[in-house]
Each structure stands twice: as C-alpha cells, then as structure tokens.
Image (cartoon, rainbow, N blue to C red):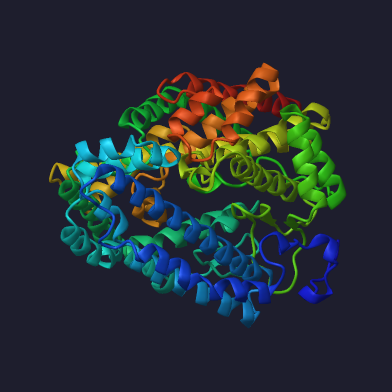
Amino acid sequence: MAEQLKDRKDMDPAFLWDLSSLFKDDEAWEEAFAGLSQKVDAVAAFDGKIVQADDGETAKNIRALLEAETELDLLLSDLFSYANLRRSEDTRAPQAQKMYARIYAKYVEAVTRTAFVQPQILSLSEQTLRKVMEKETLAPYRFVMEKLVRQKPHTLSEKEEALLARFGEVFAAPGQIADNLQDADLVFDPVKDAEGQEHELTGSNYILLQTSPDRTLRENSFRSFYKGYRQHINTFASAYAGAVKAAAAQAQVRGYASSRAMSMADENVPAEVYDTLIETVRAHLPAMYGYAELRKKLLSLDQLHYYDLYTPLTGSSGRKYTYQQAQQIILDAVAPLGESYTRIVREGFSSRWIDVYPNRGKSSGAFSSGTYGSNPYIMTNFTGTLDSVSTIAHEMGHSMHTWHSNHTQPPQYAEYTLFVAEVASTVNENLLVEHLLKTERDPGERLALLNQYLENFKGTVFRQVMFAEFEKNAHEMAERGEALDPESLNSLYEGLVRDYFGPVLVMDEEVKYEWARIPHFYRPFYVYKYATGYTSAVALSEAVRTGGGQAVRRYLEFLSMGGSADPLDELRHAGVDLASPAPLHAALQKFESVLEEARELASCL
C-alpha cells in the first residue's frame, strides 16, 4: 500500500475498477448519450394514446409503454452510473464533472416529459384497471401494475397532480432551511483539549471529536456544539414543524389516515411493523442500560454523560492487513453462504469490481454501484485497518445482492427496495465479525471486536428506534393539532433519551437539543428501516451460521428476488417475519449475549 497519495494516472491498474462492462471508454459513453433523446421520444409518444375503448388494446399499449420505459431506464442508468463512477475517481477532473452534469440534466428532462404515464394509466377506474392487468399481455408486468393499482385511491386528477407537483419545492423548503442553517450558518466556538490546545469544531468533525479518548475535548465539543443549536432552536423547531405539517397536509389530500401511513404505503408495510419494532426494542431496554453500565466501568468514570457514548471502550485495533489478506479474510467469512456465493465474490476480486486505494481527488468513503447490464462496482479507500476490511465486506454484500437480483430477475423487477437494502451488507459484516471472533484469542482485540458489534446495535437499532418513536409522536401531535414548538419537541426528545439509555446516564441540559441535528427527520418515517434491516440481518446471519443448507438456500433466494415482491414477503421467504416480534427478540438476544461476553472479558482486563 502506498503511504503517499498518487495521482490517478500513476495508480497500479490492477487495483482500479474496470468499467468496461458499462462502457469501453468515454467515447463509447458519448455515443450512447447521443441516442438517449430517441429513447425519451419513444416514451413521450404514448402521451394521450394509452387508454383505448377496448381493454385488450389498452393492455397492449401499456405493455409497449412499459417496455419503452424499461429501455429508457436501462440506458439512463448506464449513462448516469458511468458518469458518477468516473467522477468519483477524481472529483477534480472536469471531463467527468461535465458528463455527470449533462446526464443529470437529461434525466430531469426525461422525468418531466414522461410524467404523464402514471396519471393517465390511473385515470382508468379500478375495475377496468383490474381487468386490464389480468390480460396475458401484461403478465410480465403484473406486479408493476399491482403496485400502480394500490396507488389508485390516493392518486388525484392529472390537473391536481400537476398542481401538487408545483408545490414540491415549497414542501421541501423546511428541510432545505434546516440544512442551510446547519451547513452554512451555524458557527461553533472553538474548543480546548486537556492540554489546552484549541480545536476547530464543525458539524462534520463533531462525531470524530466525540470519539476522542480525551474526555475534556469530548465535553467541551459537546457543550459548544449544542450551544449553537440552542441559540437557533426556535428556527429549527419552526422548520421541523413545517415539514411535519407539509407531510400531514399531503396525506390528508391523498386520503391517507396519517402521514406515517402515506410514507409506508409505497413498500406496503403496515403500521403494525413499526409499532412492533418500538414495543420489542423497549422490552429489551434493560440490555441497553447494561451496556451503559459497562461503558461507565470500562472508561473508569464516576458518571456517564452523553459525551461518553461514542468513544471506544478499548483502544482501536492496531493490526494492519494487506489487501490480499483482506480478500482472504472476507472469503473465509462468507464461506457459510456456500461455494457459489464465494465463487462470485472471488470473481469480484479478480475481475476488478473494486477501486481499492485512495488517490488524489478520489471521493471519500465507500459505496456499491452498478446497473442491470454491468458488473457491480465498489468504491473504497483501503488503508489496511480492520474497519477497511469490514467496509469491503459490507459493500460486497450490497454488490452480491445486486448481482443475484440482476442475474435472476427481468429488468423491471431487478431493483430491490430501501426496506431491504441494508440486509445483505449487514449479513456480510456480521459474518466477518463472527469469523474473526472464532480465531481471536487476545482479550483486548476480542473486546474491540465485541465493542464494534455492540456499537452497531446501539447506533443502528436502539438509537434509530428512538428516532422512529420521536417521529411517530411528533407527527401524531401535529395531527391532533398540538403545537410543535421548542418546548414540546425538547421535552419529547429528552424523555426518550431517558427511556432508551436508562438511569446510569447523566442527563445534561444539552441533550434535549439533539433532535434538531438529525437530517433524516425531514424524510419522514425513513429511520425505522435501518433498525428493521439490521435486526433482519442479525437473524439471517445467525440462521446461516447455525441453520445449515436450508437457511443458506432461502437467503440466496431472497438475494435473487430483487423487487419482484413486497419487501416483507421477500424477508418472509428468507425466514424473517417482521409481522411477528420473534426475529426482533432473537436479534436483541444476540445483543445481550455479546454484551455478556464483553462483561466477562472486561472483568479479566
């Protein structure tokens, strides 16, 4: 691994992704881009011509329209993905920036010119729609049509839909106001560490400072950070109240019982799943209290404060891995998923799906991408740490979900929903940790692995469910006509933190302002999916490790289902029924067993 960043042109091609499964080069991309307008025209030509007096003719028109839409979507996806991947290689490169801007503009044009499709199809009565969708002509698109029919009772006239669409920017304004306030206007006082050295505090480095072993730095950054939010809390409360009221108004106009019902309808997830998640996690809160106690003990604290919740229980692992070692560790970790799975992972490593090392200008972080006709691609910035290894395992989980879906489903059903998007990635992560725990004997290293497991649970299950409960209560308050002012929102959030972290946590006054910095609250009822995805992944990874061939077969079939069924049905097929609290209980019992082992190790250190 290079210790000094190189320019992209100087990197070893063996460790750069090969994008030729998308386009051979930029010139080939340009040739495909030139044909995009023709694909948009092919869809736009159906405007006003879909519905006919004869149901059979209408079915034929809808089939031809959906096929033209699918062709357009495939080309847009290829062009967009290639430009985005090229842009991420070196964010300073003007050619890739221009390609991305051009395809984004073309995408907006395509969406605008094809916006007639859904309203015109749904202008048919539900009875007629049902007759049309049962025609053999539409058999390959039956589930697509079923999802459309579900929206019929909540779809307005074409004129009303156009009017509502004009208010899109207005509805988005509260979130943009909050983003601008946080990203541009909020300025925090600099903070000092235990040595008196001054540090800049920003929204982007706050969590990093909260992980510092220097408790003085953690406390000072915590107090300065929330001082900034306190000074603007009235504006944050007004912005959030506006977002909640906008969601409530849209739900009412569309005939939904609530904003939550509207948000969950697209994936056909009933409210009971949301409520069961909250109830089940609340039943296991004593385990969270036990983790807080362990934190207090291992950090040798007289009192546990909110600024003590992010710092690692032990020093981070000092072990370093080569990329070759990382590949073998991941292959060994996913071996329980069978030879066919590991063969495809091996192919991903050898066929250059992965852009491995950092270079000058390369995007930070990591992601998995790809299209129906291409290989999946993984961007990472490998540095040899355990976290780097875990990141590749995580992103390879996404890529394997994509690979299985694309190789099994037709294009209209290949894309899986957000509800299940983090399942495969987390299964891989959990299999990696379990594999490392099987062979790790050093108590400190083992405790570091367990700490990672516990932190994943805390951040992805307990905190996200706490956020989900905050959202549920805030929206219900607005729908009852109650004020969402700073006092009510602060009180609601403070009470939930008390409930979720228990009596060992000292409740600093600043804690009640944390809700104001959570951007996901402006995308209503999204955060609960992190928790359902994580708990599902824990249940599935445990089944794979202990349940043998049948559990593996059902999991691989789940990966192959793409978007061909509702997400709850897909998870049921894999063996996780989120209509029942059983898989949630099983996942949280895993947290409790990991916590118990961490306690035992801590007593030996």
The residue positioned farthest toward the left in the image shown:
481
The residue positioned farthest toward the bottom in the image shown:
94
Q: Position of residue 585 (x, y in %)?
A: 49, 21
**Split into 4 quadrants, where in the image is the C terminus?**
top right
In the depicted view, which residue is nearer to us: 226 or 567? 567
Q: Residue drawn at (46%, 73%), measured in percent from left and top?
A: 37
In the depicted view, which residue is nearer to us: 21 or 573? 21
Q: Position of residue 96 (x, y in %)?
A: 62, 76
Task: In the rendered view, tell whether residue 305 sits above or below residue 353.
Answer: above
In the picture provided, is 90 more to the left or to the right than 442? left
Task: In the rendered view, tell whether residue 188 sits above or below residue 326.
Answer: below
Q: Is residue 301 visible?
A: no
Q: Residue drawn at (38%, 70%), measured in percent from left and top?
A: 180
Q: Residue drawn at (18%, 64%), measured in percent from left and top?
A: 163
Q: Is residue 396 visible?
A: yes
Task: In the rendered view, tell whether residue 208 sits above or below residue 603.
Answer: below
In the picture provided, is 545 more to the left or to the right than 473? right
Q: Position of residue 394 (x, y in %)?
A: 66, 44
